[in-house]
Image (cartoon, rainbow, N blue to C red):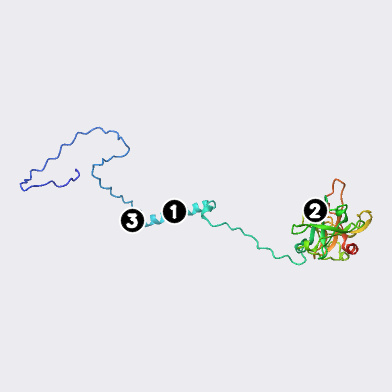
Amino acid sequence: MTPHLGTPFRGPDYIPGPPPSAPPEPPAKAPQPAAFPFSVTPASAAPLAPPSPVAPAPQAGVTGPKRHVGLVLGTLALSLVTGGLAGAVTGGWDRGTTGPVELPQAAAPPAAAQGSISAAAASVLPGVVSVRAGRATGSGFAIDQDGHVVTNAHVVEGASDVSLVLPNGRRVDAEVLGVDANNDLAVLRVAPSQAEGLRALTLGRSAQLRVGDPVLAVGSPLGLEGTVTAGIVSAVDRQARFGDNNTRQTAIQTDAAINPGNSGGPLVNAAGQVVGVNTAIATLGASRSGNIGIGFAIPVDRMTTIVRTLID
């Protein structure tokens, strides 16, 4: 049946004639291969009616509407499962769409308890200086608020120009007030106005030391200012040779690391009190002068007697 093209104009004298006869059928032609794998409709042709939807065959025991709802729910469930799996696989890599990564971290430690190593170090460091005497370097510590600083005699021996590097990093000139070469002790002095921020250390009693007591060696080994090393008292009455006359003297032996540059620095107990003056280390030869765990300090009880004489 040809597409409907509309009703033609009919005048008043219109007489209907006999219905037109059907046109003869064209002769059958041999099938021709299609030029395209799909049909082509010219732009001038009327649009064809859309094909009627084919209803799916009903399953046994399932009606049409219920089966349609089941298909929708099944498709939705499959989409959710697929999306969840994709998120689980890619979620670890797509950092741009997630929040900041949080890692568990311990809370800040409590303040150092009285008597701990860290508390002792904190109380001592403000009173320790680095000594520069010509090409020699060593350590020292303040003993009062008048600018008096104790160090070793061999640190300032023969030097005409001595300076101190304070804990705050300032460098100030120092005067050699007195030297006891036989006991390897010296007292320096800086003007109180120049010693701002330098704290006097508390002097303890070396006679109360016991083997095994914890101690700290504080100073500038190899020029590293403000270095703290920890150890114990290895012996309290060790005989060692030091000083100009190289005579045997009673010294405190410790395994706290002492190296060149520690000379003249304080050896302190767990309370932050000075119990000795770091002076010498045992070596295995001239070419091996580093720390081997055997260091010696002048007992503070002897130091106080000598220092009073030098200051007076």
Residue 124 visible (yes or no) = no
Closest to the observer, 128 or 282: 128
Q: CA distance from mark 2 to mark 1?
A: 70 Å
Left-right relation of 57 to 261: left
Q: Residue at label 1?
A: 79
Up-down: is 119 above or below 19? below
- The picture places residue 122, in percent across and down from the top left corner, at 75, 62
Q: CA distance from mark 1 to mark 3?
A: 23 Å
Closest to the observer, 20 or 63: 20
Would you call the spot at circle 2 few (<14 residues within 10 Å), some (14-19), or many (20 or more)? many
Up-down: is 32 above or below 233? above
- The picture places residue 226, in percent across and down from the top left corner, at 77, 57
| For marks 2 and 1 on the same chain, the one whose residue lies earlier in the sequence | 1
Residue type for callout 1: Ser
Which residue of the protein is positioned furthest toward the top in this rendering?
30
- The picture places residue 198, in percent across and down from the top left corner, at 78, 62
Q: Residue at label 3?
A: 64
Q: Secondary structure at mark 2?
A: helix
Location of residue 279 by image quarter: bottom right
Residue type for callout 3: Gly
